[in-house]
Amino acid sequence: MRRPKRQAARRRAVLEKIQPLQRIKLTINGEEVDLTFKPARTLLELLRDDLDLTGTKEGCDGGECGACTVLIDDEPRLACLTLAATLRGKKILTIEGLAKDGRLHPLQKAFLEKGAVQCGYCTPGVILSAKALLDSNPAPTEDDIKKALAGNLCRCTGYRKIISAVEEAAAAP
Amino acid sequence: MADLRVVGHSHPRVDGLDKVTGSARFSPDIKLPRMIVGKILRSPHAHAKVLHIDTTRAAQLPGVKAIVTAADTRDVKRRSPTYQFDDQGERAADATPMVMDQTVFCEGVARFVGDEVAAVAAIDEETALEALSLIKVDYDLLPPVFDPLKAMEPGAPLLHEAELNIAYKFVIRRGDVEEGFAQAHVIHEETYTTQLQHQAYLGPTACVADVDGAGRISLWTELQSPFRARRLLSDMLGLPASKVRIFQTHVGGGFGGKHFKRVQPICALLALKARRPVRLCLTREEEFIASPPRHATHIRLKMGASRDGALVAKETRIVLNSGAYGEVGPIILDTMTKRVDSLYRFTNIKTDSFLVYTNTVPGGAFRGFGNPPMDFALESHMDTLAEKLGMDPVELRLKNARRVGEVSAHGWEVKSCALTECIEKAAEASGWKNKRARPTPKGGKPRGIGIGCMIHVSGCRYYPGFYGSNAVVTIGDNGQVYLLSGESELGQGCKTVMAQIVAEELGIHVADIVVPDLDTDFSPASLGAYADRTTHIGGNATRLAAIDARQQLFEFAAEMLEADPGDLVAEDGRIFPKGSPQQAVTFLEVAQRSWFRAGGKEIVGRGSWDPPSVPPDPESQYGNVSSAYTFGAQVAEVEVDPKTGKVTILNFTAAHDVGKAINPMAVEGQLEGALVQGAGYGLMEDMVGVDGRIYNPSFLNYRLPTMLDISPMKIMMVESNDPVGPYGAKGVAEPALVATAPALANAVYHAIGVRITSLPVTPQKVLAALRAKEAKRRSE
């Protein structure tokens, strides 16, 4: 049986014995934080386990499903493959930081109204990938949307309503 | 059903805000004070005796808080979760034909790669993984068997204590098959095989268990049937049911794969032993190697049709590869054995079907439940018969289509059926006639168009006891309405549908209704989400609960209005005598009066509904198992690249008889999602097993359809208004996947003239078939 995870965990345990704790400042959802953590900590662990920001989901822990997508300096990145120690001074946006003053982002509103959410597990990652797309391309074609979101797996919706929701959000004033 | 205000109109999900803002908590998100982490040790061997488990070194590792093995569960046996009581008030074991052979851990013998052997709980994941590597297990290798056709023969290595590896068997005889074949103008016989398909929900299965001072255990987990799970857990832990409480978190997708698994009892055992909260979350690899996927099947089918296309005989031999354990295998086999026989007007049927143990991952429920593989075989066969008869495939299906008012060969009473309409609509909207005649544009790659039809159930009864649903609707002091249903929200949208039903009956808005998460201490017991029963059965129970609450409310309103409660109506937050809206009192005024009156008691509306269905007779297997049957037709248009064998889906047209769409947007979402899962089953998804090992246990190597793989879809909801369902509704979530794979395979045949009889229809198979065809042409 393959045991990549177990081997990785052992390597990590060794690494953590010989390397000191990391301390960095970064901005998460608009708030500057000063964090100390073990050197091998991934951004996903930092968010979910240390900061209790569980809106970022773990679907595979291998960079294969897109559920943990967050924005790092406005670029969509997989939190499970990102070492937290590399993020000094970076700006992180997670799903929890998307609504402003209780007002939903147009994407959140469109996902709700267009029925683009079913179980909702992939939703945070999909919405953040879509935000990165709309920020750089405010009027995407269907092909643009498909290319931008191809790395976000969804098992419930069949994707059609996600595409409509992104189109709807793009058209929003 | 005139003038529906809420039902029948699209409504956003009631849990949608929670989900788009990231505040929705799924089972892996739950964190309790002092919580530790559980991990499972699995067998690396497909078949081996477990001689000895030495946990000494693991127990000495600092940070390890509990280790459990089969030794901790020796006295516990599993019993069927759907028991009924016999005349003496004793539990009758075999209410449902399940094979309850999976204990908490494998005991004495490991039967597949991934079989649970032991588990640890430690202060963090690293320590838990380290502890697993320190557990020493002595195995004595046994000869394994992987091929179900070999496994079912005498002399094959045996997995369980029995003379053969046959876990279950059906023998069905209707009419006279020999006589039928004698009358046939054409006869076709073919073997079809289908693969293991994983549910591949995005949210992994996790469980958090906590034991309180009184020894009462609480679990936060994701389950399709929490009340059955409570019963099973109580059996497996040797605790009374009152000591087990299950909180349903949000569910990250189920599709059949989140019924009770070993995760829950193992997590509970760890928490009981450590006396600390434990979280056990399956990794994606564990999900693939040890969570029950859709079974692989082997189907031999022979059918005959008369000159005018009437299906005169059907003979089937089914081998369902059960994997290492039986569990729900027998009822999946039941579905494969009988369901498609009611799609068309078959009268002469002969079926022998077998559930066979092998040393592979045990199969389980997955959307469609045995229906998709058999429908693939049947609908592929229909096209070949049509060709032999010189008939259009649509015409052959229309000729044999089930009609309303009929009783099928297995005793299924069809009270609503729009199959003919679905076939006609799908053909019309897809441009069937033109594309069938001229599929490929000049100079383009070969194109083809194919159709598949299907039948499914809305709940499927296997035993005479309660097969219904319960709901409670209470009205609070400020007019807020609480809806408690025992049915499970998996993402399919049942909370929203139920809230719409309550809003409809109470004359209020969906936003006025609170739908709390299921908690087995407070939610009324129901059976859960499977067999497409939730809207049809749970919806009826919810409707009755709302009507009960409304009647109690009307008693107060009648006093206030000095009217007869029987004359009142509730509409848009107001209650008034029929025809006199100017005399209205508001819902809030009545709710407050009912709450604050002297000596008052809370309004609690109760609804319970048991469907008028009949379990199959144990001998004859005859019986009207569901209170409503669903039908549908799907047309797929594909393009095939003859150089690479790649099949590209150009579009889908799906027409489904949904009874009544309570939330059309949600129904559409179900149909679209199922089409893409069906396309995955038809073209891509395959758990590659060699020597009992799954070689692609990751999303990188087990390919799900991505956004780049989808095509335009034309969705048509045909409303046959079922006389039994709530507002006419029938199940919709499972059916849409059933007919997709055969529609695709038939389209591929139409495009390039080769029939792929084994799923998935991969480029390799298409190329090999094209080469074989070319070689045959040359040799002629």
Image: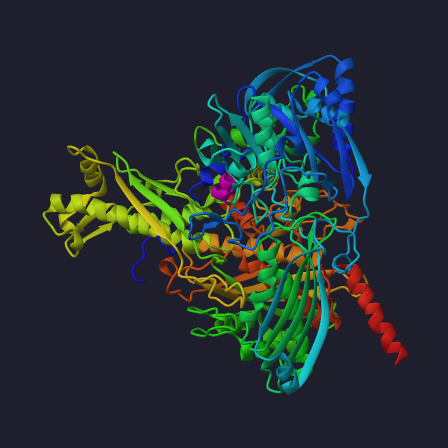
Residue at 65% in and 22% down: B124
Rendering colour mode: rainbow
Q: Residue furthest top?
A: A20
Q: Residue furthest left?
A: B562
- Work out whether A12 lies above or below B259: above
Q: Is residue B226 left or right of residue A51?
A: left
Q: Is residue B458 left or right of residue A150?
A: left
Q: Residue furthest right?
A: B779
Relative image position of residue A96 (x, y in whole percent)? 52, 30
Q: Residue furthest front?
A: B88
Q: Is residue B39 left or right of residue B475?
A: right
Residue at 21% in and 44% down: B553
> Which quadrant: the N terminus of chain A?
top right
Q: Which residues are magenta?
A: B225-231
Nearer to the camera, A121 or B149 = B149
Look at the image and say whether residue B604 sits in the magenta stretch. Answer: no
Residue A107 is at least partly visible in this image: no
Relative image position of residue B334 (x, y in whole percent)? 58, 61
